[in-house]
Image: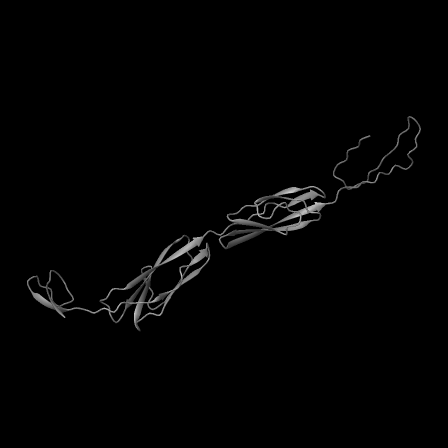
Amino acid sequence: VSILVRTLGSTPCGKSNNSENQSCSAINCVPISFTTSPDPKICSGNQTILGISNINTDKYSVSWNGALAAADTSYSLIPLTTGTYHVSVLDSNQLACPAKTYGFNVTVIPTPIASAGPDKIICRGTETSLNGSGLGNYNWSPSAGLSDTALDAIVANPDTSSIYFLTVDNEGCVDKDTVVVTVKPNPQPLIAAGSLSVCKGDSLTLDAGTGYVSYSWIS
């Protein structure tokens, strides 16, 4: 096929001349085709690899986000936010033909930061509150001694000292934390007084023993 053009500047058809008619041959471009990896969903801070395959030419050049990567058909990145990342493939046998571009939609899901709160100390038979935090769904375990396992704020009254695990799940992105609830035995003082019989006006010494934080006597 031949076409007649009048050039106004430099042209691949030959010398440039504003008054010269030139003859060019039309290029029959074979469209580039390739297969792409699925658009990824990743947790923030994680790496993902984008890839292409089954390119329908033996010679090609690849650009990832505008940067030439020769024939590199994969691209590794740690994206900070959700966005589109482009790959362009140019047929080296058809340099005058357009490249094919594809945009990968990369979704970045925030990874939660789980906190089960500070460790607690309670007396046996009493309870304490546990307050979790973090973006996502909650799961406390083990369930023994807990008022609930799926809320952020719960009540714990275990019979013995226990370690509780909090898992926060945000669309598959998970973080964990632990909290220790220490159960102290209730004091059982034994009062020693020797003889409990005294004469009027005499004194008697009562001894509840050592090892307690405070004492309160009542009659």
Question: Viewed as shown, does residue 202 lie left or right of 22?
Answer: right
Q: Nearer the viewer, residue 26 or 112?
A: 26
Q: Residue at x 67, y 42 (%)?
A: 127
Tell me which corner region of the image, top left, top right, bottom left or bottom right, holds residue 198: top right
Q: Residue at x 11, y 68 (%)?
A: 23
Location of residue 19 with respect to 179 vertically, above or below: below
Where residue 42 appears, as percent x and y from the top left, is: 45, 57
Residue lying farthest left?
19
Tell me which corner region of the image, top left, top right, bottom left or bottom right, holds residue 93: bottom left
Location of residue 85 with respect to 71 vertically, above or below: above
Q: How is the image coloured?
A: one colour
Tell me which corner region of the image, top left, top right, bottom left or bottom right, holds residue 3: bottom left
Where residue 126 appears, as percent x and y from the top left, is: 69, 41
Count every numbered label the image shows and give the total: 0
Residue lying farthest top?
201
Where residue 214 appears, as percent x and y from the top left, is: 75, 36
Question: Viewed as shown, does residue 48 lie left or right of 129?
Answer: left
In the picture, the quarter occupied by the C terminus is top right
Q: Nearer the viewer, residue 163 or 170?
A: 170
In the picture, the quarter occupied by the N terminus is bottom left
Q: Nearer the viewer, residue 19 or 210?
A: 19
Where residue 106 appears, as percent x and y from the top left, is: 40, 56
